[in-house]
Amino acid sequence: MVKSRRQQPLAKPSAKTRLRAYVRDHLRVLLFSLGKLYRTPFATTFTLLMVAIALALPAVLYILLNNLQTVTHKWDDSGQISLFLNTETSELAVKQLKSKLSEHAQVENIDYVSADLALKEFKKRSEFGELLEGLPNNPLPPTLIVTPIELAKQSDSLNALEKEFQSLANVEQVQLDMQWLQRLQTITDIIRRAITAIGIMLGLSVLLVVGNSIRLDIENRRAEIEVTKLIGATDRFIRRPFLYGGLWFGLLGGILALLLVFIVLLVVRQPAQDLIGLYNSDFKLMLPSFVQSISLIGSSIFLGLFGSWLAVGHRIAKIQPS
């Protein structure tokens, strides 16, 4: 009598084997989704250009604004206060005032510009200097140029010094050379907020562009999806290649956007340096840093994935085999 052999149960695959299969499956789908983009070059190129332009525009504006703020910070460090004295102030009174200011705890340096020297400088730099030669007296006042210490070069400290110096004897007018910089900083704050708003709106447009591309791809593959569901495929399995398609749109679009940013900045680099050079600044236009580049590409990948997830989420669930 032959004894029947009991069938031995199959061994459960190890965690390492399951992990390898999981990674291999995802890599296969990742490469498949990339190949699908390659097989539709026109639609892929159009979508990538839309994504790249939408991301490059706020990125360029943001980097240019950062460069502008770098320049203004350098100018901010050289802030000075000009004290215009009465035209009748004697040399002795000027020396006494200069000595008093030099003992001030928040004053680093004091330069004296006499009325005669101011007149010579005005004639040298202005086209209207010859008009002053016909006047009986020199209308320009003597001036003390006060350079505060580094700790006093904040807006509040400078405003306090301005009010204090205004009350000094023989001081006719006090001019804070940084007032126009403060106005410029206010304008740059407004521009920064505008760039942020533009970036948010263009980021939403990236979501719409990627989502629409994925939605069209799903509709074109509706029959394939229905058949796949008939043989038991889950929604998670079906939406995986579409999500990876959004990832590729984000990654490639971000790289293309970064390339556009570099091209634009290299084009405007020399004219921008020439313009800032007119203000006696050794300014050099900074290109995107490594962190900024990674942030741009990372943001693009996130928008691509999120846009595809929004398009895939309810669309796949609605498709059922007839």
Image (spheres, helix red, strand yellow):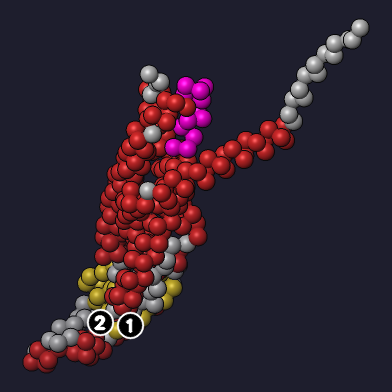
Q: Which residue is mark 2?
A: 142
Secondary structure of the residue carrying tag 2 is loop
Q: What x and y, as percent, mark residue 265?
A: 35, 67
The residue sitting at 71% across, 35% down in the picture is 17
Quadrant in the picture for the N terminus: top right
Secondary structure of the residue carrying tag 1 is strand
Tell me which numbered mark, 2 or 1, is placed earlier along the sequence: 1
Q: Which residue is mark 1?
A: 112
Most foreground residue, 53 or 13? 13
Most foreground residue, 38 or 165? 38
Residue 311 appears in the picture as rendered: no
Left or right, 58 with respect to 227, comes to left
Residue closest to the far right: 1
Q: What x and y, as percent, mark residue 310?
A: 38, 33
Most foreground residue, 10 or 148? 10
Magenta stretch: includes residue 231: yes
Q: Residue 11: which quarter of the image? A: top right
Could you tell me if the residues under marks 2 and 1 are in contact, i.e. CB atoms within 8 Å? yes
Q: Residue 287: which quarter of the image? A: bottom left
Q: Residue 161: which quarter of the image? A: bottom left
Residue closest to the far front: 1
Q: What x and y, as percent, mark residue 263?
A: 36, 67
Q: What x and y, as percent, mark residue 28?
A: 56, 42
The residue sitting at 31% across, 70% down in the picture is 268
Q: Which residues are magenta?
A: 229-242
The residue sitting at 40% across, 62% down in the picture is 259
Quadrant in the picture for the C terminus: top left
Residue 16 appears in the picture as rendered: yes
* Kind of residue sitting beneath label 2: Pro
* Kind of residue sitting beneath label 1: Tyr
Tell me how far mark 2 sits from mark 1, CA to CA: 8 Å
Left or right, 315 with respect to 123, comes to right
